[in-house]
Image: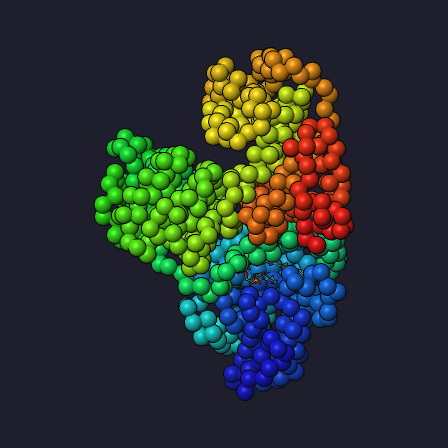
Amino acid sequence: MTELLTQAVSLVALGDIMVATADNPPVNALSHSVRAGLSDAISAFEKNDAARAMILVCAGRTFFAGADIREFAKPMREPLLGEVIARLDGCTKPVIAAIHGTALGGGLEVALACSYRVAVASARFGLPEVKLGILPGAGGSLRLPRLIGVEAALAMISEGRQIDAAEAARNGLIDAIVGSDLADGALGFARRIIDAGGDIRRASELPIPSFHSALFETARASMRKRFRGYVAPQKAVDLVETAVTMPFADAGEREYATCKELLGSPQSKALRHLFAAEREALKIEGVPADASLRDIRKVAVVGPGTMGRGIAACLLDAGLSVVLIGLSDESLGKARSGIARIYESALKRGSLSAEEIERRLSRLTLTQSYDGLADVDLAVEAVTEQRDVKAEVFGKLDAALRDDAIIVTNTSFLDIEELASASRRPSNVAGMHFFNPAHVMKLVENVRASRSAPDVLATITALARRLGKTPVMVGRSEGFVANRMLSKRTREAQFLLEEGATPAQIDRVLSGFGFPIGPFALADLAGMDIMAAARAARLPRMSDREKSCNIVDRLVAAGRLGQKTGAGYYRYDEKRTASPDPEADTILDTHRRDRGIVPREISDDEILERCLYAMVNEAAKILEEGAAARPGDIDVIWTSGFGFPSYLGGPMFHADRIGIQTIKAALDRYSALVGREYFQPAPLIERLAAEGKGFYG
Ligand code: 3H9
């Protein structure tokens, strides 16, 4: 008879095998009721002389997803996870973890403390704590190296790398892969263990496998480079080193203390905020969580340029069929080679096989015609950023597609409302704003127009997730959220340049803040011609000072297009290493002289504040207008799209940490110095500062 031990854990005896089942939707986090239930199950199992093995399994979609993140901010209630795990480890009869879905963090730690682990073939395993700014705190760093080897464990712990069941079976993390009926497979496995004598195998008692003496030093150097600014990956290396060099119990205490210390750190709070914000961003006002989704199998992409190719590639990657529509054989041919080149580099990296590439390319059709689009479920318009051209494409798609097909525009700046209204299917029109290169960049700003149907919005959100992207729904606004905020940072970087800062100084300050690359090095990488075109598009809406701050145009006129011509803001050698260039200085000096500007010494603080606060001020306006639904959406946009350091939680979270009153005072100061039209505090900032509140209350 099944006995309910706590709200979340039940226990049943099937002959001499007991089965403890945890059921704590949605992801079986190890909340208090689960920990208490597991503890009770262990007691009942140990007390029951007739029971010779126990299986630990989870109901629902996954094995334990780890400690309950929502409990982190509250005082911990006993039994603590470490206590439950120590009891599992101490069991005198075999306990078998039966795993499906994902065994993550504390969930994997529970499994590691069992005598055996079996899993279905689709299961995945990981210690992703590092992504939340913490580290395993319940024995993961101690048991994993003993089971799978020190180097493999170090990679999983320091990078949060997940592995699949096949790899887990190969490296010894699991003992068997069972068929799709997990309960049946686990019972069969338990029977074999009992019949073979009921041995228990404790990972805690295994010897430490040998490892290379330089392993930890090499890993430290690599972490410093790859995760610049992040605390947890560095500490992970120390932790694993401790785990494999200190006695088990001492290392266990050190592990728990490190996890606890990191839990209280600003970086962990920021990363946990982003974890929640990313999930919150999927909740869209007016769209029920269970909204029905339209079936998307075939997609038309209009425009075979850089964006169109990248979008087509990620659609093909997700298993969709793609019709790429262009104006000439030549442009379509180039697009096909462009997509093939993306796949060639994947082949070289070993991430795709030649057969898989062939399969993907076989789903791609190239055409100049809009005929035969009746089986297309969604069309992405990705043609040049000109209103008339886009309107014409919209008209053609409108005529060619089924009435229920969705049309999305990839416009960066144009008014989606105008495009939707001109269509005969306004409720089936929305935006999907991809970022270049579209097959790499995670962020997609999905754009709702006033008449976009809820199921259309739900469908494009699901589609973006299917493509492996991070979608955020935004509203009508010029430049939407990401580019609109970026344009303010770009403006300030240009103003600071003409006032006397150097590209190298500004780049140093912003990359020192945590951006992966400074704005001028980035411009050189992207190409100054691209920068000039973006500037030209915005020119009609620029202030007089912005119009005359035309350093980009001067560089283009001098043939300095960035890395591709060996010179832009910087000069580049054949290895594309940048160095300051006196010729660029001369262009800057001429510009300043022409504008009558006497260069001044500019402090690093001023550079950072002007670049950052201009963005935050714009974000406050965006929030007031409703173009972003929540401050968290803006944080997700900037961390997933434009390299804002995740360990600072995004611009809005970081602004709260600085304090809105401090930011308002700085905006007032820069209003006086640079001009009110650029730095007048947004009404939301005025109000929050007056109330002593932040964006997050
Ligand atoms: C840890 O274990 C520390 C220990 O080492 C030491 C302790 C001493 N807790 O992602 P989804 C919620 S640290 C609470 O959309 P999916 C999530 O917020 C933990 N809630 O689903 C969302 O809520 P809502 C280490 C959690 O199917 C809902 O579940 N573990 C947790 O796309 C659905 O989530 C991790 O870092 C949690 N642990 O993906 C794993 N996890 O519906 C984190 C999720 O209100 N989790 N929720 O928006 C994941 O990676 C994914 O959720 C998972 C499922 C892959 C499991």
Q: Is residue 162 visible?
A: yes
- Write the residue at 51% across / 51% down: 473
Q: How many marks?
A: 0
Task: Quarter of the image for the C terminus: give it.
Answer: bottom right
Is 33 displayed left or right of 382 in the figure? right
- Write the residue at 29% across / 43% down: 396
Query: Nearest the camera: 89 or 407?
Result: 407
- Write the residue at 71% across / 36% down: 667
Task: Quarter of the image for the N terminus: give it.
Answer: bottom right
Where's ligand 1: which quadrant? bottom right
Q: Give the image location of residue 407, x and y in percent.
A: 36, 49
Q: Give the image location of residue 603, x and y in percent.
A: 73, 26
- Write the residue at 30% across / 32% down: 331
Q: Quadrant of residue 33?
A: bottom right
Q: Is residue 111 visible?
A: no
Is 131 displayed left or right of 316 in the figure? right
Residue at the outermost bottom position: 1
Q: Give the image location of residue 609, x and y in percent.
A: 70, 34
Residue at the outermost left position: 371
Q: Is residue 107 above or below residue 190?
A: above
Q: Is residue 200 above or below residue 252?
A: below
Q: Quadrant of residue 223?
A: top right
Query: Nearest the camera: 214 or 300?
Result: 300
Question: How is the structure coloured here?
Answer: rainbow
Is 325 displayed left or right of 598 in the figure? left
Q: Give the image location of residue 3, x and y in percent.
A: 58, 84
Query: Nearest the camera: 204 or 520?
Result: 520
Q: Is residue 108 above or below residue 212?
A: below
